[in-house]
Image (spheres, rainbow, N blue to C red):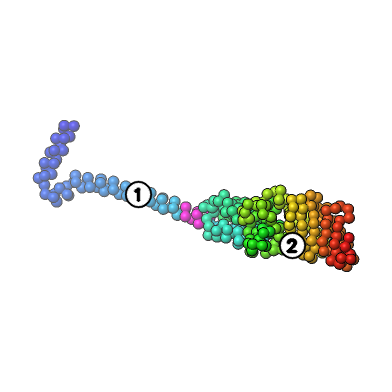
Amino acid sequence: MQQNKRRSDKLKRLDSGLSFAERFFHPLALRRFRKRLLRFLMIAAAAAALLYVLGLGVKYALDKAYGLNLQNIEYTSRHGFIGKEAAMRILGITDSVNVATLNTRELRRKLEEDPSILSARVRAEYPRSLYVEVEERIPIVYVEMREGTDTGNRAQYFMAPDGFVFPKVPEFHENFEGVPIWYLNAGDVPELKPGIRISREKYRPIVQLVSAANAYGPTEIPRIEEIFRNKDWRIDLTLESGTTVMMQVLDIKPQIERLRLLLDNARARGRRIRSANVIPSLNPVVIYADPAESR
């Protein structure tokens, strides 16, 4: 090491005695410069190659991402009254959405947060397809507080077969405008508003009534317009024809059949029933519009 140091010191003394041009163009200086230049070029070439590879990777990722844009949206509606366009508006989806960025669980949550939708399924299929299925809530009656006829507060909503209360959407429910109105009594619900669920004890006889009546055509049993539960054990109806009917909450289906027979008999005789009590299984009480025909 001492020998190398003495040699280095000797070279420095020799260099100090030379001019700048002699030192720069000296063979040793040129050899050192070439080594440094070669090392710099090798590093630059390696960096350029790395940047090129990274650029190819970014281009591939962008091309791949662009290739995942939606090209096919398959939509199924269980009951057919919420259309594809409406469902896509709820989801906020367009064809330019990238399949890779879709959160199907979040999309399902969005659909099921809509009160008109009972359940939904959303599935993404790579590279470019989305499958959406919805089952709508079926409005079977309007619900309204009976006291609203006196107070003027006539807030009216739909009720589904499970007692769920939800608002009417004209775009979805134009075919359900003729469902009956069920007038709730004070105390049936804490507050009538969308999102509540009426108790099973209250709504179950109403659902059975609507289901039993819908099994007959309008020429057999006119459309039910109004439903009242004046007492827990009793249901009162008003038909489109103006006939009022008294029933009990049990054995609804046979009572509806008795009502059909009474209406058939009245039509055959050219009479109109003003009111009927179909609770008795034998000799139900009928009052005709013509008092002389009452029995």
At which x and y percent is residue 58? 44, 53
Amino acid at circle 1: Ala
Residue in the image at 14% along x and 40% along y: 11
Residue in the image at 69% along x and 55% along y: 185
- Taking the view exactly as shown, the residue that stands out farthest to the left is 17
Which residue position is annotated with label 1? 47
Amino acid at circle 2: Glu
Q: Quadrant of the C terminus?
A: bottom right
> What residue range appears in magenta?
61-68
User: Quick check: 117 left or right of 30?
Assistant: right
Magenta-drawn stretch contains 190: no
Number of dots carrying numbers? 2
At which x and y percent is residue 248? 79, 52
Residue in the image at 83% along x and 57% along y: 277
- Disc number placed over residue 225 in the picture, else none: 2
Q: SS of the residue at dot 1?
A: helix
Give the camera-side residue of 200 and 217: 200
- The span from disc 2 to disc 1 (Cα, nearest Å) is 82 Å
Asked if residue 286 is positioned above or below residue 12 in the image, the reply reads below
Q: Main secondary structure of the magenta part?
A: helix
At which x and y percent is residue 219? 82, 64
- Few, some or many C-alpha atoms within 10 Å of disc 1 (few <14, some 14-19, many ≥20)? few
Q: Quadrant of the N terminus?
A: top left
| Residue 126 visible here | no
User: Quick check: 44 left or right of 171?
Assistant: left
Residue in the image at 30% along x and 49% along y: 41
Say which label, 2 or 1, has the lower sequence index. 1
Asked if residue 154 is positioned above or below residue 37 in the image, the reply reads below
